[in-house]
Image (cartoon, rainbow, N blue to C red):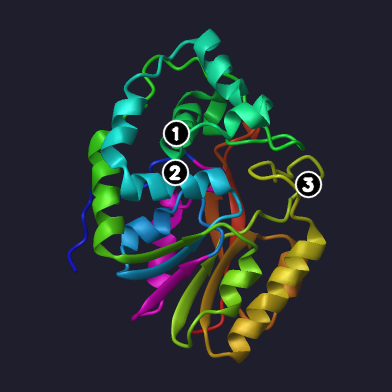
Amino acid sequence: MAKNKLVAPVVKWVGGKRQLLPVITPLLPKRITTYCEPFFGGGALLFSRQPSTAYINDINSELINLYEVIRDHVEPLIESLEKHKNESEYFYNIRDLDRDREEYLLLSNIERASRVLFLNKTCYNGLFRVNSSGEFNSPFGHYKNPNIVNAPTLRAVSNYFNTSNIIFSSCDYATVLENLPRGSFVYLDPPYDPVSDTANFTGYARGGFGRDEQIRLRECCDDLHRRGIKFMLSNSATNFIKEQYSNYNITIVQAKRAINSDATKRGEVDEVVVRNYE
């Protein structure tokens, strides 16, 4: 199937893989029948490949709701996005809607999706971050002309979702992996093992992703390997991660770190791409 170049990420996302696609793409298996991405985020790899069958999961239920609304209600979503204002007071009013859970649950799926996309495009650094109560807490970004309504991309992504067999879920990644058929390909892009004590970022959903979780994920990868399912995993190139995956093919790649409060620390860092195939 011919790829539509308008099909592209609709959100800015911490650890997004768009700039790494030239490195990752040549490492993919030659043939993929069923694609799976349990830590979906912005979905740069999926949108670049546009497989006809895919299992898409993210623990962030607001993000998955956004993708389902793009699939099912793209025109009402665009209409809602056009009503937003790039103003500080308005931003904080929209951001704080989730402080009252009962009121927030009265919002329609379209209204929730519109809110998430608006906040993503207008908050500081596009940093989707929630506190321990699950409340969005990134500050206003003060951008002059944020692209709040990217209608051509939204319509193209909606068309891709509707002309392909894309199964969405928002659950623990292990649940998704357990049920994959043999012959599937899995791309794993989990929260990264921090390269320093101050580098940890797991605020895209409530709860953290510490080293116990990294070990559990590696055990899931071992299970995929035993079942004959090919996987590729991205993570930071810490000694801990390299030791965890020492039985697999490890490629070191250079990635640009775009989000850091200290601008001097934004630059190229080593990451690993792990594969259980040649």
Hey, which quadrant is residue 160 in on the image?
bottom left
Residue placed under numbered mark 2 in the picture: 66
Report how far apart the C-alphas of labels 3 and 1 lie in the structure.
30 Å
> Tag 3's secondary structure?
loop
Q: What residue lies at 54% left-to-right and 43% top-to-bottom?
A: 62
Residue placed under numbered mark 1 in the picture: 117
Q: What residue lies at 32% left-to-right and 64% top-to-bottom?
A: 49
Residue placed under numbered mark 3 in the picture: 196
Residue 112 horizontal/vertical position (percent) = 49, 34
Badge number at residue 176? none
Give the extent of the magenta segment.
13-37
Q: Which residue type carries mark 1?
A: Leu
Q: Nearer the viewer, residue 30 or 204?
A: 204
Q: Is residue 207 left or right of residue 248?
A: right
Badge 1 density bin: few <14, some 14–19, many ≥20, Cα 10 Å: many
Residue 274 horizontal/vertical position (percent) = 58, 72
Q: Is residue 150 left or right of residue 180?
A: left
Q: Is residue 137 visible?
A: no
Q: Is residue 17 visible?
A: yes
Magenta region includes residue 33: yes
Report how far apart the C-alphas of labels 2 and 3 lie in the structure.
32 Å
Give whichever of discs 3 and 1 has the lower sequence position: 1
Report how far apart the C-alphas of labels 1 and 2 lie in the structure.
8 Å
Hey, which quadrant is residue 144 in on the image?
top left
Q: Which residue type carries mark 3?
A: Ser
Which-is-in-front pick, marks 2 and 3? 2
Q: What is the count of numbered marks? A: 3
